[in-house]
Image: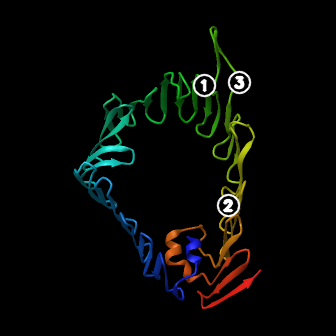
């Protein structure tokens, strides 16, 4: 987006009007770039297949399957699914929707009085029902809940139960190739919790504040039993979230003293060498990566860009042979397309475009232009 804004304009009148082959803007009223049109952004934006008003009303059209949907948060939606069936909803009175996030065939009536939906469970479908959510619920796989008194939940490899949630919870686990294996867990909150599984062990004191966990990616198995090859990972929280130390052998090492310091190192699986790392100070105010340093919001320096907010931003391409810079840059977050299309020109008083042979300069929205040769 920055490179597009800095390209030579076919016609320009200060910050208010600009036109070139794939872009035109009458700021701050209208801006159009390729398939995107803004009207007093962020009030209204439309695309070839959708439009949005104030982030509370939008239309989404899917020409590939003939479906569409209109939404007015938080009270109304209607549309047509890919099978040609219509649906609608007036929240919280009544509604039905074929697909919301990870759930399907969602229906509700006088929510939270009643709702029902389906979810895929392997090759089958699981139906979930709730009355007076979250107090009464039951599912087609036999799970049910009278929250917070007692509940039973079945997953692929585990059975979970609680009494007076969250005070007493426990679970049993069956062997599974994608999990930590057979075993059990229980917690008497807020005093103590324990996990004992084939490939995982954890003890928690005053959970979630103090815990120590170990896990194994593999164990040597012989006819006479299991022989430890040593833990593959450790994690210590003491207390969470202020201190956390984690080692995943050959994969990751992390030390966090929140919110003052964090170092996160990742290792290459094949060579065992360090592949990437990040060091943070003041939570995420200062971040030092392999190829970038950030001091939010004032400074960012990487392989192909650097910025001194709010004074200057510069981006490079073609291995650093070509660069583009601008002043001022008032938005603390890099590359916000809507801002660049509609607003950034009002405070971009100076720009330049540099190549190995020359540098083009533009001052006061192109009123003053000059070239310097190298």
Pointer 1 or 3: first along the chain: 1
Q: Is residue 249 left or right of residue 123?
A: right
Q: Secondary structure at mark 3?
A: loop
Q: Quadrant of residue 335?
A: bottom right
**Which residue in the structure is indicated by mark 2?**
285
Residue most extreme to the right: 374
Q: Residue 23 versus residue 30: which sits nearer the camera?
A: 23
Q: Residue 267 versus residue 172: which sits nearer the camera?
A: 267
Pointer 3 or 2: first along the chain: 3
Q: Quadrant of residue 297?
A: bottom right
**Which residue in the structure is indicated by mark 3?**
230
Instruction: Classify 150 as above or below 106.
Output: above
Instruction: Classify 32 as above or below 225.
Output: below
Pointer 2 or 1: first along the chain: 1
Where's residue 8, x and y in %?
58, 81
Q: Secondary structure at mark 2?
A: loop
Residue most extreme to the bottom: 367
Instruction: Classify 166 as above or below 303.
Output: above
């Amino acid at each position: 987006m920055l490179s597009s804004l800095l390209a030579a304009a076919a016609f320009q009148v200060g910050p208010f009007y600009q036109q070139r082959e794939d872009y035109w803007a009458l700021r701050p009223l209208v801006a159009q770039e390729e398939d995107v049109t803004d009207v007093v952004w962020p009030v209204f934006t439309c695309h070839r297949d959708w439009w949005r008003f104030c982030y509370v009303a939008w239309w989404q059209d899917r020409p590939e399957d003939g479906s569409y949907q209109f939404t007015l948060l938080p009270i109304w939606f209607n549309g047509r699914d890919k099978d040609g069936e219509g649906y609608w909803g007036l929240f919280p009175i009544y509604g039905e929707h074929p697909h919301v996030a990870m759930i399907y065939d969602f229906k509700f009536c006088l929510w939270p009085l009643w709702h029902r939906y389906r979810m895929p469970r392997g090759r089958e479908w699981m139906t979930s029902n709730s009355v007076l959510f979250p107090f009464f619920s039951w599912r087609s796989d036999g799970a049910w809940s009278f929250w917070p008194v007692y509940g039973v939940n079945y997953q692929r490899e585990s059975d979970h139960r609680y009494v007076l949630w969250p005070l007493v919870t426990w679970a049993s686990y069956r062997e599974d190739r994608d999990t930590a294996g057979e075993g059990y867990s229980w917690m008497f909150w807020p005093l103590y919790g324990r996990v004992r599984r084939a490939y995982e062990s954890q003890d928690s004191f005053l959970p979630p504040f103090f815990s120590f966990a170990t896990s194994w990616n593999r164990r040597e198995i012989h006819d006479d039993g299991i022989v430890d090859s040593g833990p593959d990972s450790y994690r210590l929280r003491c207390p969470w979230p202020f201190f956390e130390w984690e080692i995943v052998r050959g994969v990751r090492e992390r030390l966090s003293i929140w919110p003052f310091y964090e170092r996160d190192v990742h290792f290459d699986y094949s060579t065992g060498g360090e592949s990437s790392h990040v060091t943070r100070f003041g939570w995420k105010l200062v971040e030092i990566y392999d190829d970038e340093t950030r001091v939010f919001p004032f400074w960012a320096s990487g392989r192909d860009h650097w910025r001194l907010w709010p004074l200057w931003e510069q981006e490079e391409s073609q291995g650093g042979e070509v660069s583009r810079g601008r002043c001022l840059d008032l938005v603390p977050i890099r590359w916000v397309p809507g801002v660049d299309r509609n607003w950034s020109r009002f405070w971009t008083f100076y720009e330049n475009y540099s190549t190995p042979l020359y540098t083009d300069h533009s001052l006061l929205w192109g009123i003053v232009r000059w070239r310097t040769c190298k």
